[in-house]
């Protein structure tokens, strides 16, 4: 009997939209409800933090291998879910046009090995000047991130990949969990900002 496919919760979205924060919150929420889940962090962020940004374009194959390996290990360990802020398809998206001709097909085939549950995270950073945009740990500034969002949506449409749009706020992990396992978690009651 073949083991069930790992269900990968893919968090798409432009840089600075809160993918890593949502992934962490979702992982905590699912674990606190005793769900079978592990997280797959963004290897690209590690490359940026260690000053190896050249690998983001010249070695997307290496980055893809690292991300795929993490998902494969989680699947082999018998987990039901993996939550990631770095879906495998982003390796194709960020690869330069002149990259290996078969790279896109390789990413597609590897992605199809898993059961993908896709979310596209949104946060209006264009009109809200008070919205913080964290530039540490990334190569895009606010303006570049705004451009990337449109390009990423076009990319996903061309691939025929469907997703659920979700706004990023403190409730986003609960919204995702409600779609995965309705009724599992009670909706939180957050205290107003002026209370401890």
Image (spheres, rainbow, N blue to C red):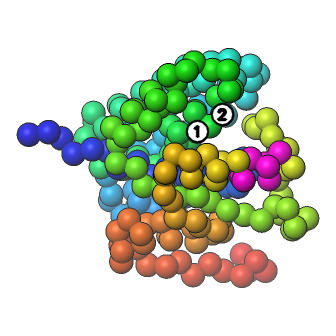
| Most distant residue in the right direction | 129
Quarter of the image for the C terminus: give it.
bottom right
Residue 56 spot, x, y in % from top left: 68, 25
Which residue is located at x 46 percent, y 29 percent? 105
- Whether residue 146 is in magenta: the answer is yes
Up/down of 33 relative to 72, above or below: below
- Whether residue 78 is in magenta: the answer is no
Q: Is mark 2 in CB contact (under 8 Å) with mark 1?
A: yes
Q: In the picture, residue 120 is in which quadrant?
A: bottom right
Residue 37 spot, x, y in % from top left: 37, 50
Residue 189 spot, x, y in % from top left: 57, 81
- Residue 25: image tag: none
- Residue 94: image tag: 2
Q: Main secondary structure of the magenta part?
A: helix
Which residue is located at x 36 percent, y 77 percent? 183
Q: In the picture, residue 131 is in which quadrant?
A: bottom right
Residue 98 spot, x, y in % from top left: 67, 21
Q: Is 23 placed left or right of 52 in the picture?
A: left
Circle 2 crowding by C-alpha within 10 Å: few under 14, some 14–19, many from 20: few
Foreground residue among 193 and 47: 47
Up/down of 181 relative to 64, above or below: below
Q: Is 169 placed left or right of 92 in the picture?
A: right
Foreground residue among 177 and 8: 8
Q: Is residue 70 something one can see in this rendering? A: no
Q: Which residues are magenta?
A: 144-150
Task: State the SS at label 2.
Answer: helix
Which residue is located at x 64 percent, y 53 percent? 153
State the CA–CA distance, disc 2 to disc 1: 6 Å
Question: Circle 1 sits on which residue?
Answer: 90
Q: Is 109 placed left or right of 4 in the picture?
A: right
Total tally of numbered discs in the picture: 2
Task: State the SS at label 1.
Answer: helix
């Amino acid at each position: 009997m073949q083991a069930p496919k790992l269900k990968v919760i893919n968090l798409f979205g432009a840089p600075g939209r809160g993918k890593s924060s949502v992934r962490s919150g979702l992982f905590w929420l699912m674990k606190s409800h005793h769900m079978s889940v592990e997280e797959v962090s963004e290897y690209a962020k590690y490359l940026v933090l260690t000053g190896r940004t050249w690998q983001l374009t010249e070695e997307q194959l290496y980055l893809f291998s690292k991300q795929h390996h993490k998902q494969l290990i989680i699947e082999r360990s018998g987990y039901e879910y993996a939550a990631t802020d770095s879906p495998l398809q982003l390796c194709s998206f960020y690869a330069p046009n002149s990259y290996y001709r078969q790279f896109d097909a390789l990413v597609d085939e590897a992605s199809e090995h898993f059961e993908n549950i896709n979310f596209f995270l949104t946060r209006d950073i264009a009109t809200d000047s008070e919205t913080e945009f964290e530039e540490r740990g990334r190569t895009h500034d606010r303006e570049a991130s705004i451009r990337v969002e449109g390009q990423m949506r076009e990319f996903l449409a061309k691939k025929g990949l469907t997703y659920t749009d979700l706004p990023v706020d403190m409730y986003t992990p609960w919204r995702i969990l409600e779609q995965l396992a309705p009724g599992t978690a009670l909706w939180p009651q957050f205290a107003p900002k002026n209370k401890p």
